[in-house]
Structures are given as C-alpha cells and as structure tokens.
Image (cartoon, rainbow, N blue to C red):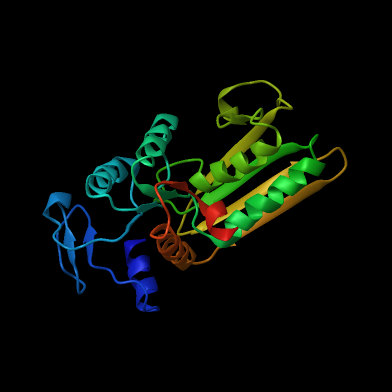
Amino acid sequence: MGKEIIEAVKKQKEIKIVCGFDLKENKENDFLIYSDLENIKEKVDVIIDFSVPVATFRILEYAKKNKIPIVIATTGFSEEQLKQIEEISKEIPIFRSANMSLEINLMANILQKIAKVLKKSDIEILETHHNQKIDAPSGTAILLADAINKVFDGKKEYDFSRMQKREKRSKNEIGFSSIRGGNIVGEHTVQFFGENETLEITHKSYSRQVFAEGALKAASFLIKQPIGLYNMEDLVK
C-alpha cells in the first residue's frame, strides 16, 4: 500500500510525501524512508498508516508526541487496542477506517437499510483476500457487521468459529467465512437468508488504488478537524 500511496500522490498536486517509515531505511524515491521514527527531521502535517497493529502503536506514539493528525488504515486490532486508539484521539485528530473505499462505506449504509426490513433473516458475511493477508476475518467484514449490528442495538453475536462446534445456527448470530488465495484484492458478500429467498450484496475491489485514494481524501479531511476520532461516515456525510 505504500507504493500505491506514492502513485496516488503523483496524480494530484495538493499533497506531497516528505518521508516514510519502514523496517529498513532507504531512499528509493525522492524522499527518505526512516527505520527510526525519532530520526525524522521533516515537518509532517499528517500521517497515513497502512501497516500492522504493533507498528501502528509505535507510529501513534510519535504522532501523539508531535501532535500530528493520523489516518489509520491498518486492520486486525483487538478490542483493547481499539480502546487505546480512542483514548489517544482525545489528544490528536485520528481518522480510522477498516476500509478506505467510498463504495464499501456506501455498502455499509445500504446494509443498514436492508437489515431494518429483513430483521428475521439469517445474516452471513463471506470475504475473500490474497494469500498474504494476516487477519481473518477482514477488518472490512467486521466493519460491515458492525454497521448491521447498529440496527439491532448491538445485540447480534459474531460467530467466527462455526467449524469448531457442533450445534445448529443461532438466530441471533452473524456468521463469518474467510477465504485466502492468490492475489485477490478484496471481495465481500453479505447474505440475508429468508424462508423462501436470499438477498446478496457484493462488493469487489480490483485495485488497491481505491484504498490509496480514499486515504488521501481522509488525510485532506483530517488536517482541517479538531482533536477527536473520525471515520468514513464523517468524510462522506
């Protein structure tokens, strides 16, 4: 995703990359990539984070120390880590979304409307990603489930491990299935199973550029905001 961000920035004039952060220091582009955050000398207005949770919190500490807004596009956080991010957002502006695609967030909005009508349906979420993805289910699958669960006042239970138990499906659950293979960017299908028919809503990402472009929009939005925690709903409303 770092490379995708670089390509997305090249297509516009409002944003300039001044430096990067990675495990190895290098200067393959016209800016320096640091391996130690404390060595950064450039003036940074906003940070975009596509990494893993352990790296995100290192970057968050740097952002908090230097009062820099940060866009978090990383997934796979635990509930405790999400609470930590919420606490840090009381000190700096933070934008966090499990998916930076505008259409995915539109899908979440549509799913809420469907769930209000099909309240008695069995709900299942199927997600497919490339074979290098670490977390399962995907952060986007959780995002979609959370959107639906708002309709049910948070009372729906998430079943991530149906194969590990032998019992029939609970009417109060949202089931998750994950597939990993090849170089699939990301596919998400939400199914509403009724007695005599099924309704499916599917989103397919064909390029990681959609996430890069969304992250840049989030960065441009965030630098104008006061301290707080923001997401795609704030950006698109």
Q: Position of residue 64 (x, y in %)?
A: 27, 44
Residue depicted at 60% across the width and 31% down the height: 158
In the shown orientation, is residue 25 left or right of residue 195? Answer: left
Q: Where in the figure is residue 14, as x and y percent of width and height? A: 37, 75
Count of numbered circles on the image: 0
- The residue at 60%/52% (across/down) is 188
In the image, taking residue 193 as reference, residue 56 lies left or right, namely left
Q: Position of residue 92 (x, y in %)?
A: 34, 46
- Quick one: 97 or 75, which is closer to the camera? 97
Q: Nearer the viewer, residue 187 or 114?
A: 114
Q: Quarter of the image holding residue 12?
A: bottom left
Measured along the vertical axis of the image, is residue 73 above or below residue 115? Answer: below
Quick check: 89 above or below 212? Answer: above
For the C terminus, the image quarter is bottom right
Residue found at the far front of this picture: 226
Q: Is 103 drawn above or below residue 193 in the view shown?
A: below
Identify which residue, 82 or 187, lies in the foreground: 82
Residue plotted at (23% across, 67% down): 18
* Residue at the (11%, 54%) spot, across then down: 39
Vertical order, 156 against 166 (above or below): below
Answer left or right for 96 relative to 174. Answer: left
Quadrant of the frame with the N terminus: bottom left
Q: As drawn, which residue projects farthest toward the right?
A: 196
